[in-house]
Image (spheres, rainbow, N blue to C red):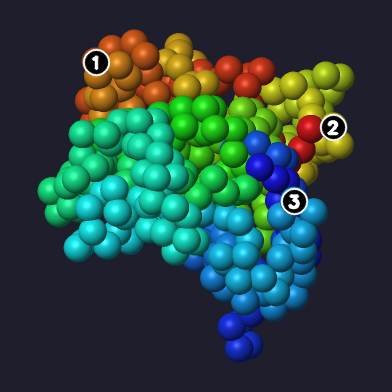
């Protein structure tokens, strides 16, 4: 196991810069998820740590070694890909033990290490099968087993669950997290799915356009997003972001106007009348009320335990999550009350969080 440190990492392809001076520290044994929209640079960053992409400038350190000029095989890492990358003509046992065979480890030791990894992953009954005879989840376990037998300092996962169906993704999320708790190996995991990030990570690194937007625990990012981008990206359904203006500040209260409706909220630091702001409200922090924001129901989506409702509020869209089974239909007009102690404010121009 080892710490991983990334310092002022840059990556350019010709004249195009895709990674812009990233700094990230990953503690020994930590499970860190790199998350962001497609094209944000998360897989490129992972591949630079792995040695599969050349570093334009900056440093990557694993343990006490700077690894910029080391090959992937010299970095003592193991990578699990989206595509499984299994040899179709080799059995599960041969796939899992292949890297050990290349290192000229004796056959008895290879067999022992493969058997241990297979036991951890529930693959013992499948060791003599070929990849074509396995399900997608079983193939992913084999890819993980191949990584485990190497006993690396760092595991790297590049969107390993994106080829699986929804039910299997949930199952494999739990298995990967349980595996980490068991092995306590430093893990860096890339995904575009923020639900994966929230449920698996000790720490999340949110990337956007090759920059780090925020680093923190899942609940830190959910409860205190640093800016409008993080607020809109972390959480499903996403946070509602409503454009407004501060019309009055008096004592510990501020009045804001949202598309003609007024709302009194706790006064945030530095607020003054005339400020353009963005009001952030999580879908679960809105409720039906006798007065408040007047909105028209557009879509009702029952999920079983919850009802997701999309409403039109003037020229903006609002999503609400109800635990109660309200009987709503498209076209209904309702008032929405806001849990005022749960609102977030962002600067209307910069998008940065206001406290």
Say which residue appears at 59% left-offset and 33% top-offset. Answer: 184
Q: What element carries label 3?
A: loop
Binning the other alpha carbons within 10 Å of mark 2 as few (below 14), some (14 to 19) or many (20 upward) gives few
Residue 201 against residue 294 in the figure, above or below: below
Say whether residue 18 is left or right of residue 306: right
Q: Can residue 136 be seen by looking at this rendering?
A: yes
Residue 146 as seen in the image, left or right of residue 129: right
Q: Residue 63 carries which label?
A: 3
Nearest the camera: 36 or 82?
82
Residue 182 in picture, x, y percent from top left: 52, 27
Whole-number angstrom distance, CA of label 3 to CA of label 1:
57 Å
Expressed as whole percent of the image width and height from the top left, the position of residue 268 reads 79, 29
From the viewer's perspective, is residue 181 above or below residue 42? above
Local secondary structure at mark 1:
loop
- Disc nearer the start of the sequence (3/2): 3
For image coordinates 77% across by 43% down, the residue present is 274
Residue annotated with mark 1? 327
Residue at image position (24%, 15%) is: 327
User: Cβ–Cβ below 8 Å for labels 3 and 1?
Assistant: no
Q: Earlier in the sequence, mark 2 or mark 1?
A: 2
Question: Label 2 belongs to which residue?
Answer: 269
Helix, strand or loop at mark 2: loop
Q: In terms of sequence position, does the residue under pointer 3 or pointer 1 come before the other? A: 3
What quarter of the picture does the C terminus occupy? top right
């Amino acid at each position: 196991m080892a710490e991983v440190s990334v310092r002022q990492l840059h990556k350019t392809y010709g004249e195009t810069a895709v990674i812009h001076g990233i700094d990230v520290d990953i503690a020994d044994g930590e499970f860190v998820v790199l998350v962001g929209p497609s094209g944000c640079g998360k897989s490129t960053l992972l591949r630079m740590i792995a040695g599969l992409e050349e570093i334009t400038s900056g440093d990557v350190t694993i343990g006490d070694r700077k690894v910029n000029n080391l090959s992937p095989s010299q970095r003592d890492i193991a990578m699990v890909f989206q595509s499984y990358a299994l040899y179709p003509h080799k059995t599960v046992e041969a796939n899992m033990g292949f890297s050990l065979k290349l290192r000229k480890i004796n056959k008895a030791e290879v067999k022992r290490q493969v058997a241990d990894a297979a036991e951890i992953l529930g693959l013992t009954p499948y060791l003599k099968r070929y990849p074509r005879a396995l399900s997608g989840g079983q193939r992913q376990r084999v890819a993980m087993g191949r990584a485990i037998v190497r006993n690396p300092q760092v595991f790297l996962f590049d969107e390993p669950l994106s080829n699986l169906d929804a039910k299997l993704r949930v199952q494999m999320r739990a298995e990967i997290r349980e595996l980490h708790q068991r092995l306590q190996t430093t893990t860096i995991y890339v995904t575009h799915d923020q639900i994966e990030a929230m449920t698996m990570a000790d720490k999340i690194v949110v990337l956007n356009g090759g920059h780090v937007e925020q680093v923190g625990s899942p609940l830190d990012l959910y409860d205190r997003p640093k800016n409008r981008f993080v607020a809109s990206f972390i959480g499903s359904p996403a946070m509602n972001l409503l454009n407004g203006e501060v019309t009055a500040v008096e004592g510990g209260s501020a009045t804001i106007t949202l598309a003609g409706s007024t709302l009194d909220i706790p006064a945030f630091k530095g607020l003054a009348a005339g400020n353009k702001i963005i009001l952030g409200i999580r879908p679960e922090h809105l409720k039906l009320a006798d007065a408040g924001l007047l909105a028209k129901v557009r879509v009702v989506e029952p999920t079983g335990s919850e009802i997701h409702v999309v409403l039109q509020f003037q020229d903006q869209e609002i999503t609400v999550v109800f635990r109660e089974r309200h009987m709503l239909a498209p076209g209904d007009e309702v008032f929405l009350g806001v849990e005022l102690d749960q609102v977030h404010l962002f600067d209307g121009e910069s998008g940065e969080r206001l406290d």
